[in-house]
Image (spheres, rainbow, N blue to C red):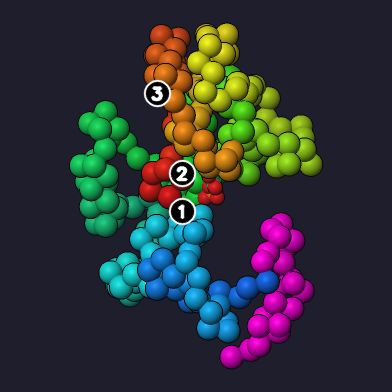
Amino acid sequence: MRSTADLIAAEDAHTSGLYTKRAIVLVRGEGATVFDSDGRAYIDCVGGQGTANLGHGNAAVAEAIAQQARTLASSTELFYNDRRAELYDVLAGILPAALDRFFLCNSGTEAVEGALKFARASTKRTGIVATMRGFHGKTMGALSATWGPEYRDLFGPLVPGFSHVPFNKPEALDAAITPETAAFIFELVQGEGGVRPATREFAHEAARLCAERGALLIVDEVQTGFG
Ligand SMILES: Cc1ncc(COP(=O)(O)O)c(C=O)c1O
């Protein structure tokens, strides 16, 4: 195998530079343990940022992926598909009865982007209210809902119609959610914002005002849900 220094140099030569990396080359994992190119073990507190919630090297997950890859590599929604039908049934069985329609996509950002578009299309309104310290992704719509100037500042002007209210201040919601609001979007536990749980009062007041004023409530569970 190539040396650690060689692997780091190879990545450094071609990376976009978007992320600041630790000087560790991860090469494999078992459950919640990952190993570097020098054989050192680490407890994985990153979990693929939510994408490896079932652990590394999970035999059942690996076998299911391999079996499907051997059977049918891809099936877009231009056609029906046996496994998608099965997945819909499983999701509908887990979720509250009212949540019975699903938009399958490739990333958290795309889920948020889809939710924002569904909200605008279904309400015929343009306003989106989000929270300070909220993080919803980096495409232009999701970024417009994201609060941090470190993510936004290089890319303006962003999508119009977005505003941000203080997180966990229910009294700020009344003025922000108006008859022009298509949706209020928030995280039940802010992830990038510092692992800050929403209070029951804040979540309930948001839901109440959205219902009262005909806006949709988007709960971004990219971190707290399925990952
Ligand atoms: C709450 C939340 N929403 C959306 C995203 C974007 O997800 P992805 O990185 O899969 O595009 C993230 C990513 O960390 C997130 O934490």
User: Which stretch did the figure color magenta?
Assistant: 1-22
Q: Of callouts 1 and 3, which one flags the residue occurring earlier in the amino acid sequence?
A: 1
Choose top left, top right, bottom left or bottom right for residue 17: bottom right
Question: Could you tell me which residue is drawn at 46 percent across and 20 percent down?
Answer: 202
Res. 227 visible in picture? yes
Point out which mark residue 222 bears: 2
The x, y position of residue 183, in whole percent, is: 50, 22
- Which one is nearer the viewer's eye here, 191 or 100? 191
- Which one is nearer the viewer's eye here, 100 or 174? 174
Task: Report whether the residue tagged 1 is closer than 8 Å to ligand 1.
Answer: yes
Check disc 3 and give the amino acid type.
Answer: Arg
Choose top left, top right, bottom left or bottom right for residue 212: top left
Disc 1 packing (10 Å; few <14; some 14–19; many ≥20):
some
Say if mark 1 contacts mark 2, CB within 8 Å.
Answer: yes
Which residue is disc 3 drawn over? 200
Q: Of callouts 1 and 2, which one flags the residue occurring earlier in the amino acid sequence?
A: 1
Vertical side of 123 occupied by 63: above or below: below
Horizontally, residue 6 falls left or right of residue 176, namely right
Check disc 1 and give the amino acid type.
Answer: Gly
Disc 2 packing (10 Å; few <14; some 14–19; many ≥20):
many
